[in-house]
Amino acid sequence: MNRSFNTRKFLGVLAMGTLASAAIGALLSTKRESSKITEFTNDVKNITRNLEKKARRQARNLQKEEWVENEKEKIMNHAK
C-alpha cells in the first residue's frame, strides 16, 4: 500500500470546495437580502396604510367638528 500525497489533487479539491462554499454562501446571502427587502417593503406598505387610515379618521373628525360648528351657528342665529 503505497500512499503518496498528491499536492495538486489536494489543492484542486481545496479550491473546488472553496468555490462551492462561496457559491452557496452567495446564494444564501442573496436569499436573505431579498427576504429583508421584502420585509422592508411590507413594513413600508403597512406604515402607509396606517397613515392613510389616520388621515381619513382625522378628516372625518374635522368634518364632524365643522358640522357641529355650523349647526351651533345656525342655532345661535335662529335664537336671536
Image: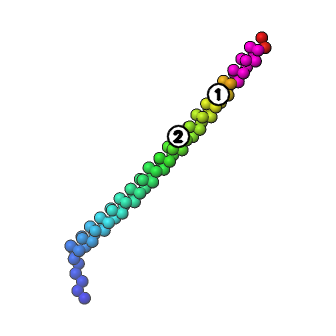
Crowding at dot 2, Cα within 10 Å, few <14 / some 14-19 / many 20+, comes out as few
Q: Nearer the viewer, residue 67 or 5?
A: 67
Picture residue at 29% right of the left edge, 64% below the top: 19
Helix, strand or loop for the magenta stretch, by majority: helix
What percent of the width, then of the height, locates residue 10?
25, 73
Give the farthest residue toward the right: 79
Kind of residue indicated by mark 1? Gln
Q: Where 21 sits versus 7, above or below?
A: above
Q: Which residue is mark 2?
A: 48
- Separation of disc 1 and disc 2 at Cα? 22 Å
| Residue at 36 percent of width and 63 percent of height | 24
Where in the figure is residue 51, as x and y percent of width and height? 56, 37
Occupied quadrant, residue 77: top right
Q: Secondary structure at mark 1?
A: helix
Residue 6: percent from the left, percent from the top? Answer: 22, 77
- Of residues 41 and 25, the one nearer the viewer is 41
38 relative to 76, above or below? below
Give the left or right position of residue 7, taking residue 50 as reference: left
Does residue 5 appear left or right of residue 62 in this picture? left
Is disc 1 in contact with disc 2, using a CB cutoff of under 8 Å? no
Q: Which residues are magenta?
A: 68-78
| Residue in the image at 24% along x and 70% along y | 11
Provide the residue designation for mark 1.
63
**Quarter occupied by residue 15:** bottom left
Query: Is residue 4 covered in magenta?
Result: no
Q: Residue furthest top?
A: 80
In this rendered view, identify the residue nearer to me: 30 or 5. 30
Question: Which coloring applies here?
Answer: rainbow
10 Å crowding of disc 1: few (<14), some (14-19), many (20+): few
Residue type highlighted by circle 2: Thr
Figure check: 14 above or below 79: below
